[in-house]
Image (spheres, grey):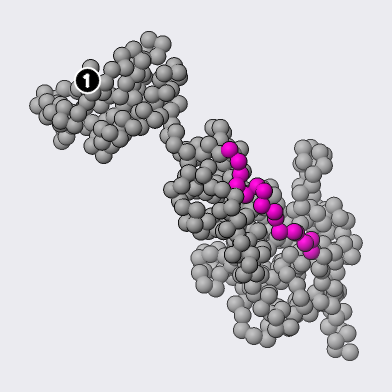
Amino acid sequence: MPSLTDGAIRQAIKQVEKSGKQKSLTDGEGRGTGRLVLILKPMPRRVTAEWMAQQWRDGRRVKKKLGSYPSMPLAGARDVFRRDYANLIQKGRSIRIACDTRPGTVADLFEAYVGYLRDNGKSSWKEVEKGLNSVADTFGRNRPARDIEPDEVVEIIRPIYERGARAMADHVRSYIRSAYSWGMKTEHDYRTASPRRFNLVYNPAAGIPTEPKVAGTRWLTEDEFVRLYRWLECPDVPVHPPYCRAVRLIMLTGQRVEEIATLHVDQWDGAEKIIDWSKTKNMRPHAIPVPSIAADLVEQIKPNEHGWFFPSAKDPSRPVSHGTLYSFIWRQRERNVIPIVTNRDLRRTWKTLAGKAGIPKEIRDRIQNHALHDVSSKNYDRWHYMPEKRQGMEQWDQFVRDMLDKKESTKAA
C-alpha cells in the first residue's frame, strides 16, 4: 500500500462525512508486523481523525493512540511512530509498553524530582524547586539532562561561593546532585511518574566536593536562657508578636523550628495539653505533652482565621517560615540585646538543660523525636511513651519555673 498524503487524508475525511461510515487509512506497508494507521470516525458535528500505532501480535491486532490529526500532522505522526514504536514492533515486543524514547530534558528531570519530594511530604520541596528553577534557566531547560557536564555545574556554583554565600553554594550543589542521583536510581522504576526516561550515564555533580560541615556545640546557660526568654516576653523594639511566641515555644518544648513555626489549630489538643503532628522530618507521627508553662502560652494565643498560631507578617494565610524566624533572631543578636544563638542552638539547649533537670536521655530523645536506629525501636517497640514523656515534661516545667524565679530573685536582690 502506498504512503499516505495530506491530500488523500482530506479526501477520505470528506468521504466519511458523506457516508457516515468509519474508515481506516494505513501508511505504507508493514503487513503482518505493524504500521501507522489513521482512523476516521463520523461524529454528529465533525469527523475525528486519530493516529494509531497498529501491531499484529500472537494473532491479535493491538492499537495504541499517538495523537489527533491535524494537530499532529502526518510528518509528526511518522516521526513518533518511527522513534517510539517501529523498533519495538521489529523486536516483537508489545506496543502497549511504548513511551516517549527521547532523553528527558533538564526541566523534565528537575520537575520530576521536585514532584517526588512533594508527593512524599518533604518540607524542603519548595526551596529545592526554587533553587532548581534558577539552575534550569542557566543550563537550558530543553537540553537533554544527560548532556550536562561537571564544569557547567561548577560554573553555576562558583559565583555563589565567591560572593560569600558558601552555605547557599553547597545547597545548590546538593540540589543538583540529588536530582541526578534520583534520576539514575529511578531510570527503570515503574513507580515514578516522569513522562520520560533520562538515559543518564553519570551524575555531573557527584565529584564536586561539599562544603565542610561544622557540627554545632553552642547551647545557652541558665542565665542566657532566662535573658533570651525575658526579652522575648517584652522586646525593646516593635516586632511581629507571633515570632516572639514561636521562639519561646521552641525553647520550652525543644521541638524542630519548622514544626513549631507551622503549628496549626488541628494539631493542638487543649484538653490533654498535647501537640500532635501527623508527619514530621523523619516521616513519622509525633506527639508531645507540653509543660504547663508552654500550655499557658499556647492557650493565650488566638489562631488566625486560617488556623495558624504563628502566621507570617506578610501573608497571614501562611505560617511563618523557619528562615524568617532565623532572620528575626539574627537581627536581635546583631543589636547585642540577646545572647548569640541560633534556632538549632535552642534545640540543643533544651536537650542539655532537660538533662540537667533529670530527664533520662531516652525520654529526651523521644520528646524531641530523634530517630532511634536500634532494631528493637525500629521494628518492634510500638509503645507511645506518652506517660514517660508527660512525666519528663513535668520535671522540665518545674526546672524552667525555678530557673526563671531564681534569676528574677537574684536580679531583684
At 53% from the left and 42% from the top, the residue drawn is 146
Residue 107 in the image, given as x and y percentages of width and height:
47, 49
Q: Position of residue 320 (x, y in %)?
A: 59, 67
Res. 200 in view: yes
> Over which residues does the magenta segment extend?
201-216
Is residue 206 located in the magenta-colored stretch of the structure? yes
The amino acid on which the numbered mark 1 sits, given as a three-letter code, is Pro
Q: Residue furthest top?
A: 59
What main secondary structure does the magenta stretch of the protein show?
Answer: loop
Number of marks in the image? 1
Above or below: residue 122 compared with residue 21: below
User: Is 300 part of what is drawn in magenta?
Assistant: no
Identified at 56% across, 32% down, the residue is: 188
Vertical order, 185 against 53 (above or below):
below
Q: Which residue is mark 1?
A: 2
Is residue 253 visible in this depiction of the protein?
no
